[in-house]
Image: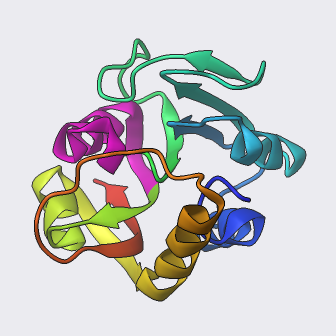
Amino acid sequence: MNSHPGGQAHTQHMLDVAALPLGARILDLGAGAGEAVATMRALGFEAEGIDLIPRSDLIRQGNLLHTDYSDSRFDAVFSQCAFFVSGDAPQALREAHRLLKTGGILLLSDVFFDNPLQMLRKAGFDPVLEEDLTPQWREYYLEALWRDDVLPCSLPAGKCRYCFITGRKY
């Protein structure tokens, strides 16, 4: 099972939407086993990733809420299914904003209980795109439940959506 809804095809879609030049510096926040980092490197990007519990040699240990990278270091910040489980999605957005160069792009695919575009604006981003992928997420989640691959986490009450959003730092 892929570690996020849509798997490799969705990772590729996120990168296609960004239209980044070859050699762009990309940081994957919550990179897990590093599948997306490996894809980005194979495509010619200068990619790295961090995770609380790295699951490959491609990824180094780090907290996406408070990284040790300098300000304005990356052309893009990328994340799939990590901001919500961090426990503080607004702080994760602020950290992503800090890490991006002016004009840099955030590529985020995650669960949202609040309006994702409002969250982007509040963190200082100019929203560019929102794609609601909730049906795909439901299918992914049900498959994970069936395989007993779901990690327990507490969910707030209310309806959630799974979205791919992008925002620019200006």
From this view, report whether residue 51 is shown above or below residue 91.
Answer: above
Residue 26 forms part of the magenta stretch: no
- The prevailing secondary structure element of the residues shown in magenta is helix
Read off the magenta span.
Answer: 84-106
User: Residue 140: which quarter of the image?
Assistant: bottom right
Residue 90 forms part of the magenta stretch: yes
User: Residue 167: which quarter of the image?
Assistant: bottom left
Residue at x 71%, y 47% (from the top left corner)? 36
Residue at x 39%, y 21% (from the top left corner)? 63
Residue at x 22%, y 60% (from the top left corner)? 120
- Residue 128 is situated, as x and y percent measured from the top left of the image, at 36, 74
- Residue 105 is situated, as x and y percent measured from the top left of the image, at 45, 55
Mark yes or no: residue 23 visible: no
Residue at x 51%, y 35% (from the top left corner)? 74
Mark yes or no: residue 103 visible: yes
From this view, report whether residue 90 is shown above or below residue 32.
Answer: below
Quadrant in which the N terminus appears: bottom right
Q: Is residue 15 shown left or right of residue 168?
A: right
Q: Is residue 5 shown left or right of residue 115?
A: right
Q: In this figure, what is the number of numbered marks? A: 0
- Residue 107 is situated, as x and y percent measured from the top left of the image, at 48, 58
Q: Is residue 95 shown left or right of residue 150?
A: left
- Residue 116 is situated, as x and y percent measured from the top left of the image, at 23, 69
Q: Nearer the viewer, residue 96 or 55?
A: 55
